[in-house]
Image (tube, helix red, strand yellow):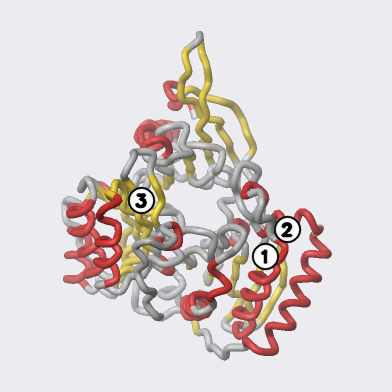
């Protein structure tokens, strides 16, 4: 992968930078394909956060990124330069382009799964090498699932690839969340691995030509599908797919996951934040014990190794926690209506007391559903509600979603004030 040139005066969003609601402060997103991160990289990212942010935490995302919050405008270029020094390019982390490609964390280590990571790498490299993919109508999301759990949420992607075997890939696509979510549909029951790159470019060409460049609320690939109808959409996609197969076939051989590695622990955060001390302790442990780290898709980090090991005391509290994902909400996001991270502990206690700690929970600070609230077992969507003339934080409560592994959306059940969340 060729590192892109750092552009101090270029498009900040393409370089993974978003403004926070606090004037002069920014969020820097760090894309990590499939959530793979080396111990030395994690240690250095924690050190960068210590130097250039408020020094509190790293934020894990649902697309296997790491975010640094509260970066001063004057330090953005320095942060990107530091990241480039450890082999991390932030180009394409945000903006109207192909976002960080997600991969189910287990597929490289599960002998009954297909290690689909090399195919994800092939797609990433092809996309980054094509300048035409950097000016899309809106963001474009791709995922790869190699195991039977379909863990990379294909039904929420613009393109979701699911390995049926090393030689056959099912394609699901044209789904997304947002204020009016709609899950994707099966586009192809089976294609060959070498046909994946051509299909990606076919979908990108269709999106670039027909996506809405005037209204960002209707600018995703699934809106093109809605406008055309499923049959017409699939027919046009197939025509472009046949065209790109003539020039873009890229031989690749997939294999099953390697044996010998086991998932020893999942370090779960409540809402995505891991302290800098915890990150540094994890980096030390991973280096000493030859641990493979994978940021998963639920605000946690999976630890794989050949031999058993013990966790240091600093990391033990991160085991056995419920899977609660939350966006920062109004704490930093300009769109956030409620402070999601402030209610995570309340929700965790309510789940534990009700015996439902196994549920997937998403807490979003607005209707954009950034924390996947519309597909989680329990989803909370932040809003404002006026009670006795006083405006208060409240949450619409949704239940019953399929977490993106199938086409089930959650159903709205009720609205609770922040003070009532123990009733979820």
Q: Check whether the beta carbons of the residues at disc 2 and disc 1 lie within 8 A of each other.
A: yes
- How far is mark 2 from mark 1, CA to CA? 7 Å
Label 3 crowd (10 A; few <14 / some 14-19 / many >=20): many
- Count of all numbered marks drawn on residues in the image: 3
Q: Secondary structure at mark 1?
A: helix
Residue at horizontal 38%, vertical 57%? 29
Q: Secondary structure at mark 2?
A: helix
Placement of 296 over or under 146, stated as above or below: above
Is 270 left or right of 407, judged from the image as shown? Answer: left
According to the picture, the residue beneath numbered tag 2 turns out to be 224
Q: Quadrant of the N terminus?
A: bottom left
According to the picture, the residue beneath numbered tag 3 turns out to be 27
Q: Quadrant of residue 265?
A: bottom left
Q: Check whether the beta carbons of the residues at disc 1 and disc 3 lie within 8 A of each other.
A: no
Q: Nearer the viewer, residue 63 or 214?
A: 214
Q: Which mark is residue 207?
A: 1
Residue at horizontal 46%, vertical 25%? 393
Q: Which mark is residue 375?
A: none
């Amino acid at each position: 992968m060729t590192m892109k040139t750092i552009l101090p005066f270029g498009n900040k969003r393409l370089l993974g930078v978003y403004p926070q609601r606090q004037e002069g402060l920014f969020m820097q997103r760090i894309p990590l394909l499939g959530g793979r991160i080396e111990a030395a990289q994690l240690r250095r990212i924690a050190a960068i956060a210590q130097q250039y942010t408020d020094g509190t935490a790293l934020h894990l995302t649902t697309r296997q990124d790491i975010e640094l919050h509260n970066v001063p405008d004057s330090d953005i270029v320095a942060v990107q330069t530091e990241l480039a020094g450890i082999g991390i390019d932030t180009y394409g982390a945000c903006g109207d382009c192909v976002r960080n490609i997600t991969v189910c964390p287990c597929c490289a280590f599960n002998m009954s799964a297909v290690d689909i990571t090399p195919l994800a790498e092939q797609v990433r490299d092809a996309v980054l090498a094509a300048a035409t993919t950097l000016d899309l109508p809106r963001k474009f999301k791709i995922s790869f699932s190699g195991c039977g759990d379909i863990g990379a949420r294909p039904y929420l992607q613009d393109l979701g690839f699911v390995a049926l075997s090393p030689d056959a890939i099912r394609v699901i696509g044209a789904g997304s969340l947002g204020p009016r979510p709609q899950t994707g549909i099966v586009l192809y029951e089976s294609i060959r691995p070498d046909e994946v790159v051509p299909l990606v470019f076919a979908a990108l060409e269709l999106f670039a030509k027909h996506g809405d460049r005037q209204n960002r609320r209707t600018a995703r690939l699934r809106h093109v599908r809605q406008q055309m109808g499923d049959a017409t959409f699939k027919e046009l996609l197939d025509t472009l797919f046949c065209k790109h197969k003539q020039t873009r076939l890229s031989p690749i051989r997939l294999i099953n996951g390697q044996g010998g590695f086991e998932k020893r622990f999942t370090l779960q955060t409540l809402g995505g934040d891991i302290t800098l001390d915890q990150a540094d302790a994890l980096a030390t442990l991973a280096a000493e014990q030859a641990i493979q780290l994978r940021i998963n898709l639920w605000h946690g980090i999976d630890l794989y190794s050949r031999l058993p090991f013990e966790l240091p005391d600093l990391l033990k509290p991160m085991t056995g926690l419920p899977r609660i994902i939350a966006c920062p909400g109004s704490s930093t996001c300009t769109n956030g209506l409620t402070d999601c991270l402030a209610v995570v502990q309340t929700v965790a206690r309510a789940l534990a007391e009700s015996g439902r700690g196994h549920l997937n929970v998403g807490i979003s600070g607005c209707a954009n559903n950034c924390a996947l609230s519309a597909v989680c077992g329990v989803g909370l969507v932040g809003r404002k509600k006026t009670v006795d003339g006083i405006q208060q934080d409240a949450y619409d409560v949704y239940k019953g979603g399929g977490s993106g592994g199938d086409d089930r959306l959650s159903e709205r059940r009720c609205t609770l004030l922040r003070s009532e969340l123990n009733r979820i």
